[in-house]
Image: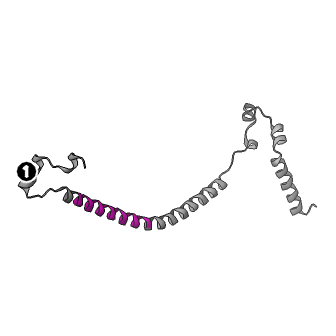
Amino acid sequence: MPPQQTNISPGIGADAARRGLNLSIAQAKDAIDQALAARLKASATALNKNAAEANAASRRSVLGLLKQAWFAFLARRQNPRLTVHDLSDRELLDIGLTRGEVDYLSPQRAIDNLRDRTRYLWNRGGM
């Protein structure tokens, strides 16, 4: 071993003698090893406790996440959507469309109106 790790300086040795401490390198290493072993054991115990809690917490967090996603889905489904059909003629002109082009691009509204009128006739006994 290098000398700086094996020899204790005279000042430290005298200070240790006044306090009644025996500072041999082997004892110092043993003390450090014991402290590190105790710290490692405490860390392992804490990790084991946290791992058990994490399993329970992960189940709760997954269920909470699913619940949150479901409520977000329902909220989005219930919100009225702004469609191109709901825009005014001025707003359509701003984006470069006319009402006829909107019906040509997405005939869904016209089909819905036709279906609703047909349903109305069936309910009235007209067909």
Residue appearing at x 19%, y 59% in the figure: 27
Residue appearing at x 69%, y 45% in the figure: 82
Q: Percent x, y for residue 112?
A: 82, 52
Task: Report the amino acid beneath label 1.
Answer: Ala
Number of labelled discs? 1
Q: Looking at this view, is 107 or 38 the one in front?
A: 38
Residue appearing at x 39%, y 63% in the figure: 47
Q: Percent x, y for residue 48?
A: 40, 66
Q: Looking at this view, is 26 or 74 the one in front?
A: 26
Q: Percent x, y for residue 76?
A: 64, 53
Q: Which residue is mark 1?
A: 14
Q: Is residue 98 left or right of residue 121?
A: left
**Is residue 47 within the magenta segment?**
yes
Q: How would you rate the neighbour count of disc 1 (Cα within 10 Å): few for under 14, some for 14-19, many for 20 or more?
A: few
Q: Which residues are magenta?
A: 29-51
Query: SS for tag 1?
Result: helix
Which image quadrant for residue 35? bottom left
Q: Looking at this view, is 82 or 27 the one in front?
A: 27
Q: Is residue 95 left or right of residue 59?
A: right
Residue appearing at x 78%, y 34% in the figure: 97
Q: Looking at this view, is 53 or 65 the one in front?
A: 53
Query: Vertical placement of 83 versus 92: above or below?
Result: below
Indicate the quadrant containing the C terminus: top left, top right, bottom left or bottom right: bottom right
**Is residue 55 within the magenta segment?**
no
Please identify the residue farthest to the right as the structure is shown: 127
Q: Is residue 62 left or right of residue 111?
A: left
Q: Percent x, y for residue 14?
A: 7, 50
Q: Decide whether the magenta segment is chiefly helix, strand or loop.
A: helix
